[in-house]
Image (cartoon, grey):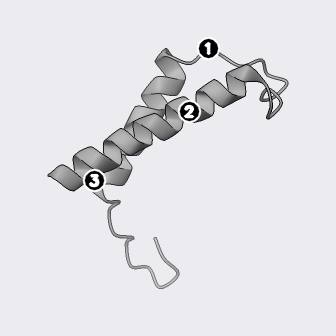
Amino acid sequence: MTRDSRPLPPPSWPKVIATTLRLWLERHVLPARPKTGRPPPGHPGARMRRRLVVTVLAIVVVSAAMT
């Protein structure tokens, strides 16, 4: 809710779909990270994860634009 007690508008469908896909990928596809934190930025796993997220988001944006 906002400060003046009006409810916030619902998120857009592309945002909902992108968030859903990102969470699903993090939980089911990407390997679990150790609790100590993320791999360093130059690490191959970090680059692969970044590419995967960018690719999925691009697919979501293109498919949303086509509808």
Instruction: Identify whether 8 is placed above or below 25.
Output: below
Which quarter of the picture shows residue 40? top right
- Whether residues under marks 3 and 1 lie with C-beta atoms below 8 angstroms apart, the answer is no
At mark 1, the secondary structure is: loop
- Whether residues under marks 1 and 2 lie with C-beta atoms below 8 angstroms apart, the answer is no
Q: Please state which amino acid type lies under the numbered disc 2.
A: Arg
At mark 3, the secondary structure is: helix
Which residue is depicted at the point 47% across and 32% down? 23
User: In the current view of this chain or complex, which residue is farthest to the bottom?
Assistant: 4
Which residue is depicted at the point 67% across and 29% down? 47
Can residue 64 be seen here? yes
> Circle 2 is placed at which residue position?
51
How many angstroms separate mark 3 from mark 1 (CA)?
Answer: 27 Å
> Circle 3 is placed at which residue position?
13
Q: Please state which amino acid type lies under the numbered disc 3.
A: Trp
How many angstroms separate mark 1 from mark 2 (CA)?
Answer: 15 Å
> Circle 1 is placed at which residue position?
31
x and y percent of residue 8 in the render?
39, 70
